[in-house]
Image (spheres, rainbow, N blue to C red):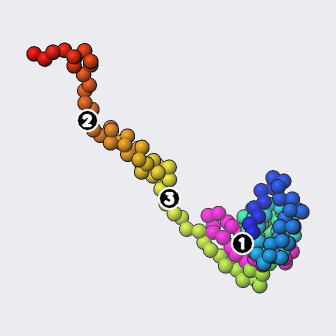
């Protein structure tokens, strides 16, 4: 079960609680992307996945390095009663902290991406037909009056 809380009022505390409890009864894991700074609201979830800003605000820590994140996450995991916490850090990668205290940092690597829109348009059949029309020499069309005139 995936709960992505955008703090828009849909995932109330009651809905969150009932969803997590139902998933646990069914033996399913629950992954939560929290927006509430009180991680105890998500008590019993399998994994919490806050970004670094949400994590530092909720734990009131600086948490700049994986070691600092690991230290702060252990306390947050105990308070939230979850199995693990995955702190996403945009260009710095992500840090996974397990309930037993193991910390795994996965760095992010830069990737050069081709703009999808340009690539897609280049390959679309309509664009290929249009390019072919532009590449062909145009025939001059004679007007009706010129084609109807007798040839000498």
Residue depicted at 84% across the width and 64% down the height:
16
The one nearer the camera, 27 or 47, is 27
Can residue 102 be seen here? The reply is yes
N-term mark: 2 or 3: 3
Q: Which residue is mark 2?
A: 137
Percent position of residue 2, x then y? 74, 66
Q: Mark 2 to mark 1: distance in Å? A: 60 Å
Identify the magenta region: 78-97
**In this picture, is 27 found above or below 140?**
below
Residue 142 vs residue 53, the one in the foreground: 142
Question: Tag 1 or tag 2, which sits nearer the N-term?
Answer: 1
Dot 2: what SS? Answer: loop
Query: Who's the residue at 63% across and 69% down the image?
Result: 93
- Residue 56, position as x, y percentages in the image: 78, 66
Q: Residues within 10 Å of mark 1 (few under 14, many from 20)?
A: many
Assess whether residue 127 is covered by the magenta stretch. no
The crowd level at tag 2 (other Cα within 10 Å; few <14, some 14-19, many 20+) is: few
At 27% from the left edge and 19% from the top edge, which residue is drawn?
A: 143
Residue drawn at point x = 10 percent, y = 16 percent: 152
């Amino acid at each position: 079960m995936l709960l992505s809380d955008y703090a828009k009022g849909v995932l109330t505390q009651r809905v969150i609680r009932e969803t997590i409890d139902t998933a646990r009864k069914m033996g399913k894991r629950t992954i939560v992307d929290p927006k509430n700074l009180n991680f105890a609201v998500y008590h019993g979830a399998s994994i919490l996945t806050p970004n670094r800003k949400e994590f530092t605000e909720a734990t009131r820590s600086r948490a700049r390095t994986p070691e600092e994140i690991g230290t702060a996450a252990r306390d947050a995991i105990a308070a939230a009663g979850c199995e693990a916490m995955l702190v996403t850090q945009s260009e710095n990668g992500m840090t996974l902290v397990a309930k037993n205290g193991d910390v795994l940092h996965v760095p992010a690597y830069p990737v050069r991406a081709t703009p999808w829109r340009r690539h897609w348009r280049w390959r679309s059949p309509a664009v290929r037909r249009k390019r072919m029309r532009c590449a062909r020499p145009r025939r001059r069309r004679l007007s009706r009056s010129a084609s109807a005139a007798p040839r000498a």
